[in-house]
Image (tube, rainbow, N blue to C red):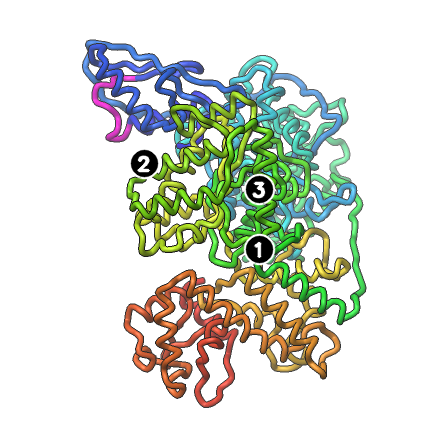
């Protein structure tokens, strides 16, 4: 458990501890109330026992436990806390018994008629009597259909809610995109359950949390983003649910609370629709949505007897409660799914039975044009979804989705917008401007450009912390763009301004002043001035009177390293002291909590940003003190800040991944997974996206295939179709046997793990443009970059890439020197280890880094390394760039 919004979360955490060996033997029992934790201890009151209580709770709740006030601090909108009281008893300890409780009661909702919504989003709820009928797929198809529509020129926005607490398929699918979510439907239900006037503070708090949660749904080769409310946050929430939907509606005046809440939440988020995936069956988890006539209920059934009969029972109950005289209510839609040709006759018979339940007089007319009952055809590829990313391929153009589109068009009558672009600028001007843009972007340390591609990791970072203080370690290899993003944050001076820049809307409610605590030593003067301006301006607002300079931080670190300081506690104290000096805090006791209280007392929020760890800790593989320093920062300070409830301080550390791997010697995989969604890694699709973005930067009217949204959301197929004006379809004529240009470029720049860096792409485009402008003959007038120039550009890219990886991984210097000193006749591909004089460990290192790949005939090297190391192919054979990478990735399981 790492989030504590209400007393239920504290109760849940204690239940988990109660079952573990950490639970003290003399703690008999406990009671958790909304303002108090009462501990019963079988011991006499003493200072030792009191100290034990403080120590145990401090270990379990970290910075959320205040030992002075004896309070557990909750992460909420009104700074709530639980007072810890101890009750001493002479009774001995008792064993803890877990009781298997399951409520299955179902009752009709006789609470009257809810008020009609006059505005706000349309609400759709998907239900079925049994699982496995395509309910979740249909809900996603509805969302895709909405995503194709536009409202006032903007694509429809949707709030997707997973309300299936027993089989939360959407939540599991979402985790494949962004890991574990920090806020759930169960959290929201618990908060509104406890607040009588939930529409005020509680709703605002929940809205801020939901803004951090997005789902990327592919639609027509592009990604669309929608708000997402998962069913649960922690698995323990499902196993011990704090509240159920039935709990929320049992009090008078709250009969329609769940739908009212989601409607108001949708209005706050400015979405056009809310889509809810319900629990199957006759369940009180789904009843509040099924019996609310304001909801457009969509019921799905197969042709099986149990499915049809079960859904008829549910539909009859729903229709019996439908108001007959008022407009603004929605009759349920009924879909027969997975219908084969053999089952069509059976469907017609069942459809008659279903339509007979609807309260209309002319049933014959309904049977001929059944608006409320539709059939979805069976398709083998739709049986197993697997990943959200595959839904586009499985649904696009299929009869299944055409029927969904038709049904939705009768509910929402919005005109679709289209956007077309045409025209190219003069080739020489384009090439010249491309060279300038690439030169400015190759090294972030010298870049003056405010425009940049909003990549998925950066969008994840800003969405995750759009309404809360950021606490993250942003990892990436050399050249991934870490320093560039660091500078963009510093330029904005306010975290809110950076979030709004990335998300494209004024959505952020979390404002804090940016304070750069550490930076690269290799910045150009204008960027150093930029950092000083940010520091001076924001420290002035904080009222800091003392002087603070990052150069002084460098000196203090160097001195500590020289003295061989090996204590993590000392390094944590150094980092905290540096933070205190930066914000102007001179208290006697410096800790994460005291720093936070200092800022809270002044009504200020601060986000600390650090970059350049590789510069100041440049001997991380050799000097243990440097490893301890990095570990104390990333595994010590960052988690402490993350644990703060209602934090007024945040921290973002930009660090090369190899620096962290050398410092965090235990459980690095676990550490890495915490921040995986923020890691700045570049795969082939993201590399091509960057290429297209640069084309659009140079030429704002660049034509984008099927353009209905931002470049950030295009899938690879549409990106590739938008790039032929840059480099042609192939490295030759379009009908030649040459390689496809896009595939060749990303393959030539990738290592055998499929990894490449933003700097590689920028460097390649700039050099290709330069070589094209120097060529006297251009054989291909239908493109800007000539194939010969593109092939030759790899030489320069390879030289620079090898230099950088030698700096990043010093062990490679000796290995590469061995290869360079090998006689030319032995520097041939494929090669064997002995011919280059490499040891078993050295070849294994090259394989692990994607610099070597073994096939039956020997080892190969990727183009990005082969060129600089002057490795030739035997007998003048032409390098098979794409096939080699494909084989390497297949062998590696990627």
In front: 174, or 67?
67
Q: Position of residue 706 (x, y in %)?
A: 72, 58
CA gap between label 1 and label 3 equals 17 Å
Left or right: where 287 falls relative to 221: left
Q: Report the mark closest to the observer, 1 or 3.
A: 3
Left or right: where 279 falls relative to 24: right
Secondary structure of residue under mark 3: helix
Q: Residue 275, relative to residue 58: is it above or below? A: below
- State the mark number for residue 569: 2
Q: Report the mark closest to the observer, 2 or 3.
A: 3
Residue 299 visible in the picture: no
Residue 772 visible in the picture: yes
Q: Which residue is mark 3?
A: 532
Q: Position of residue 627 (x, y in %)?
A: 34, 48
Residue at 42% across / 81% down in the picture?
A: 829
In magenta, the rendered stretch is 19-29
Main SS, magenta residues: loop
Q: Position of residue 316 (x, y in %)?
A: 61, 29
Residue at 52% across / 61% down in the picture?
A: 757
Q: Which residue is mark 1?
A: 444
Secondary structure of residue under mark 2: helix
Please identify the quarter of the rendering in which residue 139 is found.
top right
CA gap between label 2 and label 3 equals 29 Å
Q: Residue 750, relative to residue 214: is it above or below? A: below
Q: Residues within 10 Å of mark 1 (few under 14, many from 20)?
A: many
- State the mark number for residue 401: none
Q: Residue furthest bottom?
A: 875
Secondary structure of residue under mark 1: helix
């Amino acid at each position: 458990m790492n989030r504590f919004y209400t007393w239920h979360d504290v109760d849940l955490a204690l239940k988990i501890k109660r079952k573990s060996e950490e639970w003290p033997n003399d703690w008999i029992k406990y009671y958790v109330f909304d303002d108090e934790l009462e501990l019963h201890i079988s011991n006499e009151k003493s200072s030792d026992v009191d100290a034990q209580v403080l120590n145990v709770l401090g270990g379990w709740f970290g910075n959320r436990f205040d030992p002075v006030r004896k309070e557990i601090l909750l992460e909420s909108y009104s700074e709530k806390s639980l007072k810890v009281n101890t009750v001493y008893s002479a009774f001995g300890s008792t064993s803890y018994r877990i009781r298997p409780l399951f409520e299955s009661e179902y009752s009709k909702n006789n609470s009257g008629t809810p008020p009609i919504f006059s505005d706000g989003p349309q609400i759709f709820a998907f239900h079925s009597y049994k699982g496995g009928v395509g309910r979740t797929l249909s809900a996603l198809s509805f969302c895709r259909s909405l995503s194709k529509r536009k409202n006032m020129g903007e694509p429809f926005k949707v709030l997707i809610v997973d309300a299936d607490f027993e089989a939360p398929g959407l939540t599991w699918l979402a985790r494949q995109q962004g890991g574990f979510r920090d806020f759930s439907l169960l959290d929201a239900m618990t908060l509104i359950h406890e607040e009588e006037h939930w529409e005020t503070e509680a709703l605002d708090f929940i809205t801020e949390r939901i803004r951090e949660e997005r789902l990327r749904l592919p639609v027509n080769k592009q990604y669309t983003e929608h708000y997402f409310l998962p069913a649960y946050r922690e698995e323990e929430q499902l196993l011990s649910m704090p509240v159920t939907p039935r709990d929320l509606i049992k009090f008078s005046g709250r009969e329609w609370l769940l739908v009212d809440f989601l409607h108001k939440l949708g209005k706050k988020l400015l979405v056009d629709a809310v889509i809810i995936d319900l629990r199957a069956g006759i369940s009180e988890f789904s009843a509040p949505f099924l019996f609310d006539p304001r909801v457009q209920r969509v019921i799905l059934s197969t042709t099986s007897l149990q499915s049809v009969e079960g859904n008829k029972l549910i539909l009859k109950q729903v229709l019996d409660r439908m108001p007959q005289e008022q407009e603004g209510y929605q009759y349920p839609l009924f879909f027969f799914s997975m219908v084969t040709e053999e089952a069509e006759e059976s469907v017609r018979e069942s459809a008659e039975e279903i339509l007979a339940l609807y309260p209309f007089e002319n049933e014959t007319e309904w049977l001929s044009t059944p608006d409320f009952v539709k059939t979805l055809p069976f398709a083998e590829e739709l049986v197993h979804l697997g990943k959200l990313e595959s839904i586009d391929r499985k649904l696009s153009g299929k009869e299944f989705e055409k029927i969904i589109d038709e049904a939705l068009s009768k509910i929402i009558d919005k005109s679709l917008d289209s956007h077309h672009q045409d025209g190219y600028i003069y080739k020489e001007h384009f090439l010249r401007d491309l060279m300038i843009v690439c030169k400015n972007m190759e090294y972030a340390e010298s870049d003056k450009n405010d425009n940049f591609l909003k990549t998925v990791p950066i969008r994840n970072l800003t969405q995750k912390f759009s309404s809360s203080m950021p606490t993250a370690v942003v990892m990436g290899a050399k050249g991934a763009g870490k320093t560039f993003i660091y500078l963009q944050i510093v330029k904005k001076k306010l975290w809110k301004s950076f979030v709004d820049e990335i998300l494209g809307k004024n959505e952020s409610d979390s404002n804090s002043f940016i304070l750069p605590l550490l930076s690269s030593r290799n910045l150009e003067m204008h960027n150093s001035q930029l950092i000083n301006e940010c520091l001076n301006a924001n420290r002035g607002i904080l009222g800091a009177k003392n002087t603070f300079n990052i150069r002084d931080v460098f000196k203090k670190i160097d001195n500590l390293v020289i003295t061989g300081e090996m204590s993590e506690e000392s390094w944590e104290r150094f980092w905290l002291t540096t933070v205190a000096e930066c914000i102007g805090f001179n208290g006697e006791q410096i800790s994460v909590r005291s720093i936070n209280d200092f800022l809270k007392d002044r009504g200020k929020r601060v986000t600390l940003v650090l970059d350049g760890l590789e510069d100041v800790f440049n001997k991380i593989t050799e000097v243990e003190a440097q490893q301890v320093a990095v570990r104390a920062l990333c595994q010590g300070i960052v988690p402490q800040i993350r644990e703060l409830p209602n934090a007024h301080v945040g921290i973002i550390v930009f660090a090369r991944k190899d620096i962290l791997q050398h410092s965090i010697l235990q459980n690095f995989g676990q550490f890495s997974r915490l921040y995986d969604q923020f890691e700045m890694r570049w795969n082939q699709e993201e590399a091509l996206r960057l290429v297209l973005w640069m084309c659009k930067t140079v030429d704002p009217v660049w034509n984008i295939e099927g353009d209905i949204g931002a470049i950030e959301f295009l899938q690879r197929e549409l990106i590739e179709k938008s790039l032929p004006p840059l480099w042609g379809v192939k490295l030759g004529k379009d009908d030649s046997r040459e390689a496809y240009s896009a595939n060749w470029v990303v393959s030539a720049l990738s290592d055998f793990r499929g990894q490449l860096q933003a700097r590689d792409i920028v460097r390649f485009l700039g050099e290709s443009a330069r070589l094209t402008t120097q060529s006297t003959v251009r054989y291909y007038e239908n493109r800007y970059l000539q194939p010969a120039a593109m092939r030759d550009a790899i030489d320069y890219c390879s030289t620079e890439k090898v230099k950088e990886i030698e700096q990043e991984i010093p062990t490679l210097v000796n290995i590469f020197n061995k290869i360079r000193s090998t006689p030319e006749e032995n520097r041939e591909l494929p090669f064997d280890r002995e011919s280059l004089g490499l040891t078993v460990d050295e070849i294994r290192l090259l394989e692990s880094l994607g610099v070597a790949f073994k096939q039956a005939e020997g080892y190969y090297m990727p183009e990005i390394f082969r060129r600089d190391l002057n490795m030739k192919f035997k007998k003048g054979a032409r390098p098979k760039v794409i096939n080699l990478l494909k084989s390497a990735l297949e062998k590696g399981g990627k």
